[in-house]
Structure formats: structure tokens, C-alpha cells
């Protein structure tokens, strides 16, 4: 039989095959074990013993073999243990994107709409007469032929330059973003895991930019006592350390990165749950975790003002509700002329996504 036969889609029961169900659990646990495959599989075996997540036909041994065969893990030739592959990292990012932002339609344009007209991929609603320098792909053929018929009649068709009409296209901007993630010890204090939601938001934003806005740039840095950049592939396995919060170092590094970017639109997203408590001084650190130290605060606010002078907007996502911490964020935001969101962990992803999309519509300077 030639051709294709279509039938009604029948979803698999219980969320897919047994491998897919176990894979989903495996990927979730990998974020809590910081990418340790052996520890993740140990946890899964314990869960299986207590809750019987496998059955008599498909066991944990089968799942491990499938993980290897399908390219999710590979054996380290030096240590001899299992390590995650890039396929695992990407799948975790995609799952985070779907979990936080829903199923987004992926496009290849990679740009963001602005209120300017110019060279772009999407045809706008405005038209104008042809000018020297316009390209043929900008011509509104239908309207140009109509103009020629009106101007010269239909008996002897002629098309002159003054008949040509251009359909304006919406100019689209490129944006460079630095995402700062607080990895100080407070991100896991008081029985609340704040770092895992922050990681998921970062992974979702990274996957969004890579798939929907590939011409944008995203750099990710973490800050504790110091600040340093990390690769996107390291995001799922990011750990909190015994650190204070050196916001000054984080903003300073973000500024250095954005200075090297050629895009006209530059911004910093900062996810934090606390106040700045640390500065680097020579080979040591100046620390004060008991209050808003004016020495630390003044240097941090000076950095916010410097960003404002460079046209770099800082958007702060504060995931703590203490009034005195919010007071610092308000002063920091006012100094930078930026934005601040006081978010719960549950709503963090929606805040980040909406603000990122809104910022893309800003006018290119």
C-alpha cells in the first residue's frame, strides 16, 4: 500500500513505557545528587525496594542497560564508574523548560520584536514607497502591480520605480543576558531547598534561549565568597557551598562579561535570597553576616550605579520575604533604575520568563 495510514493517537498508560517512567525519576534525582550516577541509582534501588517501582518483567538491571544503550550514561575509562552524557544534561534542561514555562513553540528566528522597523523576519503592517537601497525581497509584489495598473492602465502594463511599494518588516533585537545565581549557604538553610528551584529556572531559561532565541547570548555565573562563570552543562549539578554572599563580585564579573558583548541590549538577572555579606580584600575577605554592613552595602550600590551608567539593567529575583532584606533590594533597584520581583520558589520561573520576554521588546539604542 502506497502512502500513510493515520489513526487516532492513543497515549501510553501511566505516562509512557517503564523505561520512560524510571528515566523521569532518574533525571529528577540527578539534580539532587549533583550528577552522581552511582548515588542516583542507589537511591532508585532503595525506592524500588520500598515502593516497587519496577515489575517482574522490567527490573533496575534492565533500566541501567537501557541508560547505557540509549546514551544517557557512559563509563569513565579512568575511574570505571558511570558518568552522565550531554544527552542527559540536555534532557534535564528540556524537562525544566516544559515544567516551568509549558510547551513553547520553538522557532529558528532567534530574535525579539521591537517597536522599530527594519531588516527582520516578520512582515509588519506598514508600507512605504520604494527607496534606493531597498532589496527585492522587501517588495510588496501584489500592491506594486496594483499601483502600476492604477497609474498606467491595464492595456499596456508598465511597472515604474514610483509604482514599487515596500512592506516594512519588524526589526528584531538581540540581547545579552548574564544570569547570577546565589550559592551561599543560606540557599539551603532553615529546612528549605532554594537552590534546586533556582537551578531549574536557570536551565529552563538556558534552553529557551538556545531553542527560541539562538542569536541571543546567555552567560551564567555563581557567587558566594567569590564569583565565577559556569557552563550550561554544569547547571543541573550545581552545589551550594559554605559561602557568604559577595554580590559585589557577582555584579563586577557580570559587567566584565557584558562589556565584551556586541549586542546593544544588555541585562543582568540575579537570583538571591539574602543581603550582601562579603567583600574581597587583597588575599582575604571582609565579612559581616549579622546585618546590612554599610561598607559592603556602599560598594555594592556603587556597582549598581555603574551598571546604570553603562545601560545595563539589573533585575533582582528575591526569594526571601524578610522585610529588611527587601529594603536592601529596593535601594539596590532604585540605584540601578532596574526591577525587582519578590517571588516565592513556586512562582520564580514565571517571573523570570515573563520579564525576559518583556525586556526583548525594548527599543534598540
Image (cartoon, helix red, strand yellow):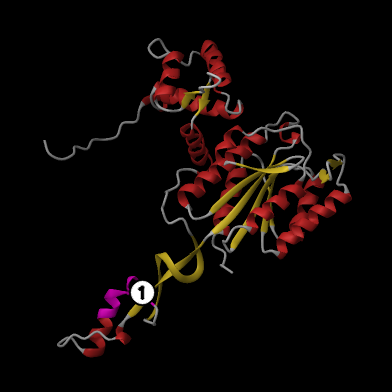
Q: In the shown orientation, is residue 255 left or right of residue 37? A: right
Q: Identify which residue, 77 or 102, lies in the foreground.
A: 77
The answer to whether residue 150 is above or below residue 134 is below
- Residue drawn at x 58%, y 64% is 264
Q: How many marks?
A: 1
> On screen, 335 above or below 189?
below
Q: Position of residue 335 (x, y in %)?
A: 77, 60
Circle 1: element type: loop
Magenta stretch secondary structure, dominant: helix
Q: Residue furthest bottom?
A: 152
Query: Residue at 36% of width from left, 81% of height from top?
Result: 130
In the image, residue 74 lies in the stretch drawn in magenta: no
Find the magenta span and give its range.
134-145
Q: Is residue 59 left or right of residue 345?
A: left
Q: Residue at x 79, y 45 (%)?
A: 275
Q: Is residue 128 visible?
A: yes
In the displayed structure, would residue 138 be above or below residue 221? below
For the question of whether residue 334 can be seen, the reply is: no
Mark 1 packing: few (<14 Cα in 10 Å), some, or many (20+)?
few
Q: Residue at x 57, y 28 (%)?
A: 35
Q: Is residue 139 magenta?
A: yes
Q: Quadrant of the N terminus?
A: top left
Side (left or right) of 190 relative to 169? right
Measured as percent of width and height from the top left, residue 117 is found at: 47, 71
Location of the C terminus by quadrant is bottom right
Front residue of this view, candidates 97 and 238: 238
* Residue for badge 1: 135
Amino acid at each position: 500500500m502506497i502512502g500513510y495510514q493515520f489513526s487516532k493517537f492513543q497515549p501510553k498508560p501511566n505516562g509512557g513505557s517503564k523505561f520512560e517512567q524510571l528515566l523521569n525519576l532518574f533525571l529528577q534525582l540527578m539534580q539532587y545528587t549533583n550528577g552522581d550516577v552511582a548515588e542516583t541509582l542507589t537511591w532508585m534501588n532503595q525506592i524500588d525496594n520500598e515502593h516497587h517501582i519496577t515489575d517482574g518483567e522490567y527490573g533496575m538491571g534492565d533500566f541501567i542497560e537501557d541508560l547505557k544503550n540509549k546514551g544517557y550514561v557512559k563509563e569513565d575509562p579512568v575511574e570505571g564508574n558511570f558518568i552522565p552524557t550531554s544527552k542527559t544534561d540536555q534532557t534535564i534542561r528540556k524537562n525544566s523548560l516544559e515544567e516551568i514555562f509549558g510547551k513553547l513553540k520553538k522557532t529558528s528566528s532567534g530574535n525579539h520584536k521591537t517597536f522599530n522597523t527594519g531588516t527582520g523576519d516578520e512582515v509588519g503592517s506598514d508600507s512605504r514607497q520604494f527607496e534606493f537601497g531597498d532589496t527585492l525581497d522587501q517588495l510588496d509584489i501584489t500592491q506594486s502591480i496594483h499601483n502600476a495598473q492604477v497609474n498606467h492602465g491595464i492595456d499596456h502594463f508598465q511597472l515604474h520605480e514610483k509604482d514599487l511599494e515596500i512592506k516594512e518588516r519588524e526589526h528584531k533585537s538581540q540581547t545579552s543576558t548574564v544570569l547570577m545565581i546565589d550559592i551561599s549557604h543560606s540557599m539551603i538553610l532553615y529546612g528549605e531547598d532554594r537552590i534546586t528551584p533556582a537551578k531549574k529556572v536557570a536551565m529552563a531559561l538556558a534552553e529557551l534561549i538556545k531553542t527560541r532565541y539562538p542569536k541571543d547570548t546567555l552567560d551564567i555565573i555563581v557567587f558566594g565568597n567569590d564569583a565565577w562563570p559556569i557552563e550550561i552543562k554544569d547547571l543541573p549539578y550545581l552545589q551550594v557551598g559554605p559561602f557568604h554572599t559577595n554580590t559585589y563580585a557577582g555584579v563586577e564579573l557580570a559587567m566584565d562579561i557584558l562589556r565584551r558583548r556586541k549586542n546593544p541590549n544588555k541585562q543582568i538577572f540575579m537570583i538571591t535570597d539574602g543581603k550582601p555579606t562579603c567583600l574581597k580584600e587583597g588575599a582575604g575577605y571582609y565579612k559581616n553576616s549579622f546585618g546590612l554592613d554599610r561598607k559592603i552595602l556602599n560598594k555594592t550600590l556603587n556597582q549598581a550605579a555603574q551598571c546604570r551608567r553603562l545601560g545595563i539593567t539589573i533585575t533582582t529575583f528575591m526569594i526571601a520575604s524578610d522585610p529588611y532584606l527587601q529594603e536592601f533590594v529596593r535601594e539596590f533597584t532604585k540605584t540601578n533604575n532596574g526591577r525587582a520581583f519578590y517571588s516565592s520558589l513556586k512562582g520564580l520561573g514565571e517571573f523570570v520568563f515573563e520579564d525576559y520576554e518583556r525586556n526583548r521588546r525594548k527599543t534598540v539604542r
